[in-house]
């Protein structure tokens, strides 16, 4: 993750990351796992965000999370799109932005407790012809 003029942006080392993390959405299918659903609109990260003094977390927005340029996607995302604790990746706040962030991801078994102590801060908006 790096901070850009469009907000926190996922920078992938994967050759296809420019598409899968910035266009489209992700959905988890039973017995299959996470599946990418292509989209046409770019954003720095199509995710719901949670934070506290100790943790930062993100969860992929599902395919039904259509972006409306007037209302955006806000802190109601978890409830509206039924995004649960098991869909989040959390890292200690002081590790957020580290080069190898995947090494810092907290075990998913702790997510229920962490979700209770965090606040949803999702604020995806549209300004100056860019999604932020």
Image (cartoon, rainbow, N blue to C red):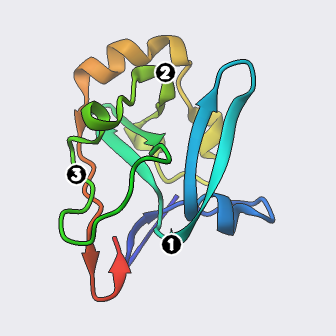
Residue positioned 56% across, 18% down in the render? 107
CA gap between label 2 and label 1 equals 25 Å
Looking at marks 2 and 1 on the same chain, the residue that comes earlier in the sequence is marked by 1
Residue 9 image offset from top left, x and y in percent: 49, 64
Could you tell me which quadrant the C terminus lies in? bottom left
Residue 92 image offset from top left, x and y in percent: 43, 33
Residue 12 image offset from top left, x and y in percent: 68, 60
- What label sits on residue 54 in the rendered view? none
Looking at marks 2 and 3 on the same chain, the residue that comes earlier in the sequence is marked by 3
Residue ranking furthest to the bottom: 128
Which residue bears the numbered disc 1?
42
Residue 52 appears in the figure:
no
Residue 106 appears in the figure:
yes
User: Element type at marker 2?
Assistant: helix
Tell me: residue 68, above or below residue 86.
Answer: below
Looking at marks 1 and 3 on the same chain, the residue that comes earlier in the sequence is marked by 1
Residue positioned 56% across, 31% down in the render? 105
- What label sits on residue 74 in the rendered view? 3
Which residue bears the numbered disc 2?
86
Q: Nearer the viewer, residue 40 or 4?
A: 40
């Amino acid at each position: 993750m790096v901070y850009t003029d469009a907000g926190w942006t996922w920078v992938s080392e994967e050759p296809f990351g420019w598409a899968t993390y910035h266009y489209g959405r992700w959905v988890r299918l039973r017995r299959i796992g996470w599946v990418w659903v292509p989209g046409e609109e770019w954003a720095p990260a199509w995710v719901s965000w949670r934070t506290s003094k100790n943790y930062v977390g993100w969860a992929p927005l599902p395919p039904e999370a259509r972006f409306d340029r007037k209302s955006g996607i806000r802190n109601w995302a978890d409830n509206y799109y039924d995004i649960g604790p098991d869909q989040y990746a959390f890292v200690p706040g002081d590790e957020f932005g580290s080069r190898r962030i995947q090494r810092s991801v907290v075990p998913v078994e702790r997510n229920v407790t962490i979700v209770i102590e965090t606040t949803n801060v999702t604020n995806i908006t549209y300004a100056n012809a860019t999604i932020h």
